[in-house]
Image (spheres, rainbow, N blue to C red):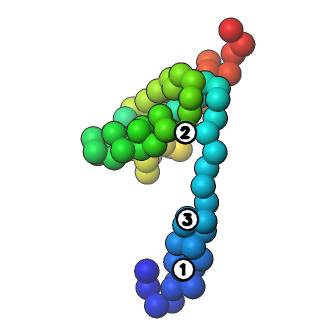
Amino acid sequence: CTAKGKTSCYLIAKANQQYHPKTYNGDAHLFRVKQQRTTLVRQKFSFWNYLVKGTITLHQIPCTHLTLLKEGNVETLAALMSEAMKPE
């Protein structure tokens, strides 16, 4: 945090300490970019396993976090989301 943004950093840190997400008893779809650090993927996926008690379906988009909303990638994301929302 910079001196200029200290108040914002403090408020974000305080909110993170006070937030306790509840478990979800259904299934979930997790959309992620494919090009991430391996350790980050493992850590974040284990977080979702802790919260979601049903099945987690992982959908990977072949891009990075910074290129997710660029042409081509955003269409891939939209198609995956549309498919995931179809009734069974």
Q: Position of residue 17 (x, y in %)?
A: 55, 67
Circle 2 Cα neighbour tier, 10 Å, few/some/many (<14 / 14–19 / ≥20) = few
Type of the residue with mark 3: Asn
Q: What's the residue at 52%, 77% (across, down)?
A: 9
CA separation in Å, label 3 and label 1: 10 Å
Residue position for label 1: 10
| 74 with respect to 65 (left or right) | right
Q: Position of residue 75 (x, y in %)?
A: 56, 31
Type of the residue with mark 1: Tyr
Up/down of 29 relative to 83, above or below:
below
Quadrant showing the C terminus: top right
Residue position for label 2: 51
For the residue labelled by badge 3, is the local secondary structure a helix, a strand or a loop? Answer: helix
Type of the residue with mark 2: Leu
Q: What's the residue at 64%, 29% (across, down)?
A: 25
State which tag comes first along the sequence, 2 or 1: 1
CA separation in Å, label 2 and label 1: 26 Å
Residue 55 shows in this picture: yes
Which mark is on residue 44?
A: none
